[in-house]
Amino acid sequence: MVESAGRVVELSSPFIRSAGRILVGLGYDVILVEPPEGDPARREFDGHAFAHWHAGKKSVVIDLATEAGRRNLSRLVSEADIFLDGSDVGTEPVVPQHGSTVHVRVTPFGSDGPRRRWAATDLVVAALGGMLGQVGDPDGPPLALPEGQAEQLAGVNAAIGALLGLRMRAHGPVPRVDIAAQECVAAALEAGALAYLHEDRVPPRPGRVHPLVPHGLFRAADGYLGGGLGGSPRMWDALLAWLIEEGAAEDLDDPRWHDPVERKIHQDHVFEVVQRFLGKWTKQEFAVAAQARKLPWAAVDRPDELLLNPQLNDRDFFLDVLSGESVTRDLGFGFAFPEGERVRALIVPELGAHQALLGPRRAQSAARHAATATGSGRMPLDGIRVLDLTWVLAGPYCTRILADHGADVVKVESLGRPDPTRFAPAMHLSRGPHDDPDTSGYFNDVNRNKRSITLDTRSPAGLAVLADLIAHSDVVIENFSSAVMDKMGLGYERMRELRADIVYVSMSGMGHTGPLRGWVSYADIVSAAAGLTAMTGWSADEVVGVIYGHGDIVAGLQAATAVLAALGHRDRTGRGQHVDLSQYEAMASHMGTSVVRAAGTGRAPVPMGNAHPTMSPHGVFRCLGPDRWCAIAVRDQDDWERLCVVIERPEWVVDERFRTAEARREHEDEIATVVSAWTVSMSADLAAEQLQSVGVPAGAVQNGRDLVEADPQLRARGYYVRGVHPRVGPFLHEGAPIRIGEPVAVRRAAPLLGADTDAVLGDVAGYSPETIARLRADSVLS
């Protein structure tokens, strides 16, 4: 029997349950504390929701309304490595003392601040965090992402926070890990707030077109496709050659279209020509033909179609959930762990099946759990060096998390191939010219707290320098396509020769194995292939899709989880490993209950717009002012009755037409009309405040300006952090949503291109000044 990585006690909520699931996938022994009536997920989707979120956990029933129950929980927590605490602010049944148990507190808005007690659901947090305002048509209402994406952002951050806390435990008592779901969302908007911070601009909702790069959603003969013109001249040339070959180029062979700025200005026309061409193809045929030309396209697949995907099946991504005699296929985890092992099956626990755990725990060495030293001022990743070969968003987002929490992250760049976020016109967010690689707000936010070296990795001498850096690093991370590192002669086996216990995380789009391993992918391609795009819309025939970099953010968070899990595994076993993370699988693992429901019922999930299967009313309602909306979620009958009083329709409380959520959905148009008539006369903030005053979840749909300037909760918690950049000067950075004691600081601004080359080669690789000078003279360093 494999030894557990540690014990976790989970006091669950929708904002923390995915953290417990992730830790199950990492080999932790997770104990789910349930009330006498069972976790609410047992009653969702005929138990399929509980199977997804809680399979593989152990179930104990504790009545926290009793003193005896609270004592039982306190004892259970005191014996655990991690306490995942999803209790509401002010209702904490136990408050662990700082010590050997890592206490991870996850709430919608954080444990302090003026809105700490506000009621919330996924919809409300998505609205107040800025996610909702980024999806939908510019002239229509904001649109929710499906499958609880705001909740899951909180959950994966909680898992990362737990693993960071375990690293701190070796050096002293661990402060409480405080995670606010709103901040997790606000940190995951790609350019949502950055456009305002660096260009004084609030982008409109982009509809079906990416706000920065020339990608979008297209209609195939039998569904939808995600893709576009790509991110390099080669991709445009290949697409144009294909169009000419098929006699479908129309006027795009005119030399004017070779200019990417011209294509961006007249993008609508270019997309119309492409749409006329691909509209005759089936989605799969076109995607395969495009990828054969190394063009970034993917079919927009439904969650039920994922079960047939050859790449996911070849890599054994799916697992079985076992409940009694029933076996149901479900989503696996974001990466195989440890050392490439996949979880094949998980058992769904019966209510209270593990009550024996409430008895005295078997004797265990206290030394394993006790803090061994006092580490005042230490950060969780002090002493860990990360060699960062990533670029754009997914990889740099991962390494930003590591750098924020103390790792020495060395970003490897070159003047010939710098990070596109330094120079690409669409991504170079700044108030000045867009040709300075050091002034891009996009780059400077995602790459704070890192060092930069410039190195010609196309030369043998440059690869020798890179090998020396690998030998002196704990972690190597890259998001190249699957064959690049082997072609460089620096695959995992070579890395192990350089450092036997190296942790290597690769982040290719599809993974290093499988029939689609060579496919080209961007965030929108991953979202399309993983089912997220198909579920983001008003109906199966009116898909809008996810156009901004949500898939990149999720991949970055999963990669950070992988790094920390692998470091913990190395601490326990002395062994490093290669985590072959597929961005596709990372995003697919965040598709919630969609696949287990499809497999368990035989019915394909469909987009629901802003509706919810168990809550009603549930949506966004227009308020005073242009494009101002308030999100409202009625969870139960109590919420409904309070809403009726606030909107001055008390007679609806006893109206039999509205007695249940299902009944209210049958009259949703009538209800929406009345609620909208109430909200439209006031500001979104005022509407939300009046509803929150009686406990009804509500929140304004916020944009980047609202988050930075107006949100009182973010301001009170100091979410946006000032830093001073040597070229740009002072500006606000997005905060870090994982707080271990104090908020994360910008210790050093994002690096100027190559600014740390000499220092890194000297203090890391041990090169002499003469050696560095020779390498520079030979153009190995730039």
Image (cartoon, rainbow, N blue to C red):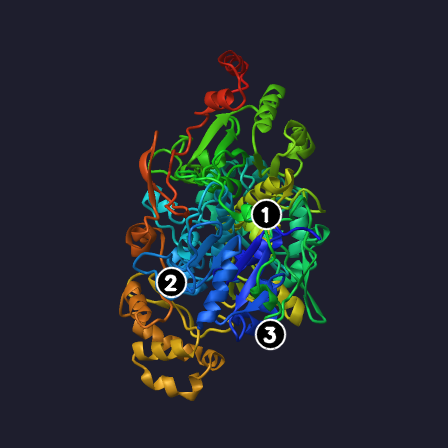
Query: What's under tag 3, amino acid-wise?
Result: Asp
Q: Quadrant of residue 92?
A: bottom left
The answer to which quarter of the image holds residue 265 is: top left
User: Which three-letter amino acid code belongs to the residue tagged 2?
Assistant: Val
Residue that mark 3 sits on: 46
Residue 522 appearing in the image: no
What element does badge 3 sit on? Answer: helix
Q: Which residue is mark 1?
A: 583
Q: Are marks 3 and 1 in contact (CB under 8 Å)?
A: no
* Image x and y of residue 260, in percent: 49, 38
- Identity of the residue drawn at 58% across and 49% down: 365
Near-viewer residue (472 or 722):
472
Query: How far is the residue under mark 1 from the one under mark 2?
Result: 34 Å
**Lateral position of residue 694 relative to residue 751, left or right:** left
Question: Can you tell which of label 2 and label 3 is closer to the viewer?
Answer: 2
Q: In the shown orientation, is residue 54 left or right of residue 381?
A: right
Residue 564 position in % (x across, y down): 55, 43
